[in-house]
Image: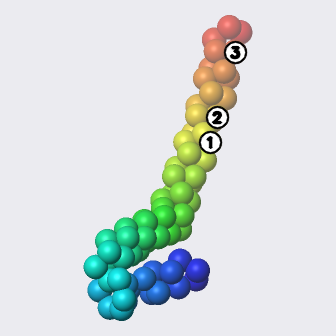
């Protein structure tokens, strides 16, 4: 919600509306891009990577248990 507010409030500045628009427009575009990318990373990429890592660790754990069982059976 806060990110959306910042992005929407920077739109007039990025379009060159208002006093000092020539100097503030590039800064406004950079702020909009940064807010958009950080929001996307926070809401989409971080949970996806977390899920992949958790599933990977679970697979490694299962593989390790099966391997240790196989080694113990071969020793018997």
Would you say the residues marked 3 and 1 are in contact, meaning their CB atoms lie under 8 Å apart? Answer: no
Q: In this view, does 18 lie to the left or right of 66?
A: left
In the image, residue 5 above or below residue 23: below
> Judging from the image, what secondary structure is the residue with disc 2 in?
helix
Please name whichever residue, 50 or 37, is drawn nearer the observer in this view of the structure. Answer: 37
> Which residue is depicted at the point 66% across and 29% down?
65
Mark seen at residue 58 = 1
The reply to whether callout 1 and callout 2 are in contact (CB within 8 Å) is yes
Kindly identify which residue carries mark 2: 61
Number of residues whose C-alpha sits closer than 10 Å to that of mark 2, classed few (under 14), some (14–19) or many (20 or more): few
Q: Horizontally, is 66 left or right of 27 in the view?
A: right
Sequence-wise first label, 3 or 1: 1
User: Which residue lies most toward the top here?
Assistant: 75
Q: Which of 64 and 39 is in front in this view?
A: 39
Which one is in front in this view, the residue at disc 2 or the one at disc 3? 2
Marks 3 and 1 sit apart, C-alpha to C-alpha, by: 21 Å
Q: Tag 3, which secondary structure?
A: helix
How packed mark 1 is, by other alpha carbons closer than 10 Å (few <14, some 14-19, many 20 or more), is few
Q: In this view, does 74 lie to the left or right of 24?
A: right
N-terminal label among 2 and 3: 2
Of residues 75 and 59, the one drawn nearer to the viewer in this rendering:
59
Q: Name the residue under label 3.
A: 72
């Amino acid at each position: 919600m806060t990110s959306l507010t910042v992005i929407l409030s920077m739109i007039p500045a990025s379009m060159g509306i208002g006093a000092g628009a020539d100097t503030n427009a590039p800064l406004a575009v950079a702020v909009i891009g940064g807010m958009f990318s950080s929001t996307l990373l926070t809401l989409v990429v971080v949970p996806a990577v977390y899920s992949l890592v958790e599933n990977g660790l679970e697979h490694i754990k299962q593989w390790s248990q099966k391997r240790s069982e196989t080694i113990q059976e071969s020793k018997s």
